[in-house]
Amino acid sequence: MPTSRTVLVTGAAGGIGTFLRELLPGHGHRLRLFDRRPVEGEPGAVTAELHDDKALRAAMAGVDAVVHLAGIPLEAPFEEILRSNIEGTYRLYEAARLEGVRRVVLASSNHAVGFTPVPAEGAPPVPVTTPHRPDTFYGLSKCFGEDLAALYWHRHGIESVCLRIGSCFRAPRSARMLATWLSPGDCARLAHAALTAEGVGHTVVYGSSANTRLWWDLSGARALGYEPLDDSEPYAAELLAAEDGGPRPGDAWLGGPFCTDSPPTLES
Ligand code: 15L
């Protein structure tokens, strides 16, 4: 597998898309960009819906791999999740098949297993083989994406690395994110490993930094060559002091606020 590749990034205008636009070229990748919104400062980016087959296939022609980030990143009514995340991901894989793309790096999420209990202190981390326990329609769409990736591997030989991303922000924003944080630099290192590792077939891994308070098992990601360099711990004192009020709703589950009666939405 060559270490420098032409990679199509969908959802390039979003939060993680913005980090990868900044950082993946430093790992030697040439990027093509795709988003339903214009990508700031990138006049060459394709502005189109995933449902525009012609635009999607044209953007994919000749690329080595796709990093698929596009979709609704939080909870939303089922019909919206169905169109953007479920149908959108299906269309992505169909276009990849028709254009002969051999590798997809898929943004899955910890919310595919959100209703998994947070491990007790000293207990083993949550393995990647833990059963799907989506916490929202959003999480359910990520379960679908992981299974769709399996179908396209077994039936069509398209390889996928599904990244169950934790919380990818410049800095952790809550006490929960001390466990789930994925720094932008580690996100790019993880995407690079997922793009370049040999023989991944259909692989699902967790995506976090090397957090002292990590809940899940990073060994699958490390086996791809991912070496996280960041840890949320320097933020701990400040974030814990800010949340001095004790446990919050959803704290018992990996999915945290997504497991409450009011999961985060684009409007909240
Ligand atoms: C996700 O999957 C969301 O896209 C993101 O906005 C964060 O909320 C993250 O999970 C998280 O669990 O913190």
Image (cartoon, rainbow, N blue to C red):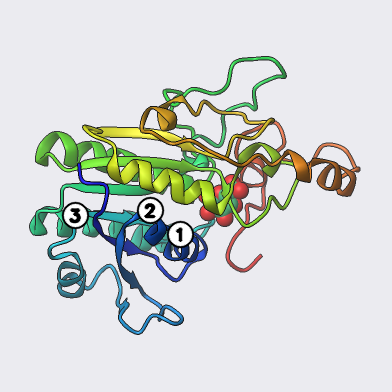
Q: Are marks 1 and 2 in contact (CB under 8 Å)?
A: yes
Q: Disc 3 marks which amino acid?
A: Asp
Instruction: Please rate how many residues cluster around mark 2, counting C-alpha atoms within 10 Å: few if below 14, some from 14 to 19, many from 20.
Output: some
In the image, residue 129 lies at what x, y percent? Answer: 41, 23
Residue 143 visible to the viewer: no
Name the image quarter holding residue 92.
bottom left
In the image, residue 15 lies at what x, y percent? Answer: 52, 63
Q: Secondary structure at mark 3?
A: loop
Q: Which residue is mark 1?
A: 23
Residue 126 visible to the viewer: yes
* Tag shown at residue 90: none
Q: Are marks 3 and 1 in contact (CB under 8 Å)?
A: no
> At x 32% / y 40%, what residue is drawn?
161
Above-or-below relation of 173 to 19? above
* Tag shown at residue 64: 3
Instruction: Please rate how many residues cluster around mark 1, counting C-alpha atoms within 10 Å: few if below 14, some from 14 to 19, many from 20.
Output: some
Q: Disc 1 marks which amino acid?
A: Leu
* Tag shown at residue 27: 2
Name the side, left or right, on which 126 lies relative to 120: left
Comparing labels 3 and 1, the label whose residue is closer to the camera = 1
> At x 46% / y 25%, what residue is drawn?
219
> At x 27% / y 47%, what residue is drawn?
3
What is the spatial separation of the Cα atoms under label 1 and label 2, in whole angstroms? 7 Å
In the image, residue 240 lies at what x, y percent? Answer: 84, 42
For the image, the number of numbered tags is 3
Which numbered disc flags the more N-terminal residue, 3 or 1? 1
Name the side, left or right, on which 65 lies relative to 221: left
Kindly give the residue lying farthest to the top in the view shown: 123
Comparing labels 2 and 3, the label whose residue is closer to the camera = 2
> At x 67% / y 48%, what residue is drawn?
261
Name the side, left or right, on which 249 lies relative to 190: right
Q: Disc 2 marks which amino acid?
A: His
